[in-house]
Image (spheres, rainbow, N blue to C red):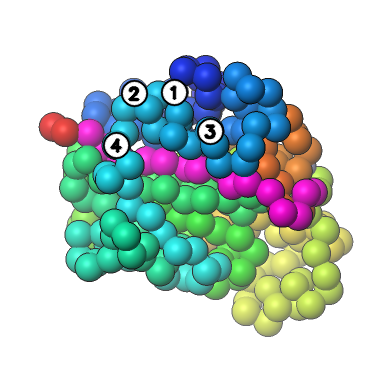
Amino acid sequence: MLCEVYRQGVSYLVFEELESIPGFLHAFTTRRTDDGDFAQAGSEKERFLKALGVPRRQLIPLQQSHSDRVIIAEESACGGESPCVADGVIITAPEKYAVIQTADCLPVIAVEPRARALCAIHAGWRGTRARIVEKGIQSFLKLLGTSVQDLRIAFGPCIRSCCYRVGDEVRNDFQREGHPVEQIFQGNRLDLSKANRLQLSKVGVNDVLDCGLCTACDSGRFYSYRREGHTGRMWALAGFGRR
Ligand SMILES: [Zn+2]
């Protein structure tokens, strides 16, 4: 079940099913703050980190580029001042937090509670077309040597098919890449969530916690690139604290 938490002047969303994992911290930010819905974009993040008790130095920032690249944080030299160029990150150490930034794209968080490991992914239409979620979760499982039954996977807010009309060329691209377009498009409207759930089912994941919320429908709560153009970004944050 999805809950909205208000703490220290900011609001964020959490899944109860993930909150109950010992030591695991996750949150999907919203744009709502005490200053009103349209506080200066980005100004809510420091308060958000404070509310969660996460120091900024423990974040693993990504320079997202709509690719299919998922890195393993512990094997990457990037971090700190030089963000890792990737659209997904696997973390197996404590006190390191993934941050996926979105304003319509789908943020995905996968957790393996016993291994205290997680994988966070940014999936817009390009990443989805490149199957970043399918590839990322496969790498995650391979690295951990565990089975899909041990994973819990959540989808945060993203643009939904109600608001996501795309051009013919996008649909044609998906078709060319062998995606089941009849299932993931309704006319020219793309269902990002469904497309990624179908990718997950190919690796054996059938249970996904999907918040079901549309970023373009709910302007009071979310930034939406499609609706607003230049706008802020939401964060999906996930990591394990000290043991
Ligand atoms: Zn919508």
Q: Residue at x 47, y 70 (%)?
A: 68
Q: Residue at x 40, y 24 (%)?
A: 51
Judging by the rendered image, the residue that carries numbered circle 3 is: 44
Query: Residues under labels 2 and 3: Cα distance?
Result: 25 Å
- Inspect the image, locate mark 4, and give the three-letter code of the amino acid beneath it: Pro
- Image quarter of residue 135: bottom left
Could you tell which of marks 3 and 4 lies nearer the N-terminus?
Answer: 3
Q: Secondary structure at mark 4?
A: loop
Judging by the rendered image, the residue that carries numbered circle 4 is: 55
Of marks 2 and 3, the one in the foreground: 3
Write the start and end of the magenta stretch as one range.
Answer: 227-241
Task: Find out whether the residues at labels 1 and 2 contact each other: C-beta distance under 8 Å.
Answer: yes
Inspect the magenta stretch and tell me whether residue 112 lies in it. no
- Inspect the image, locate mark 2, and give the three-letter code of the amino acid beneath it: Ser
Crowd around label 3: few <14 · some 14–19 · many ≥20 (10 Å): many
Of marks 4 and 1, the one in the foreground: 4
Query: Residues under labels 1 and 3: Cα distance?
Result: 23 Å
Q: Position of residue 37 (x, y in %)?
A: 69, 28
Crowd around label 2: few <14 · some 14–19 · many ≥20 (10 Å): few
Inspect the magenta stretch and tell me whether residue 237 lies in it. yes
* Outermost residue, bottom side: 176
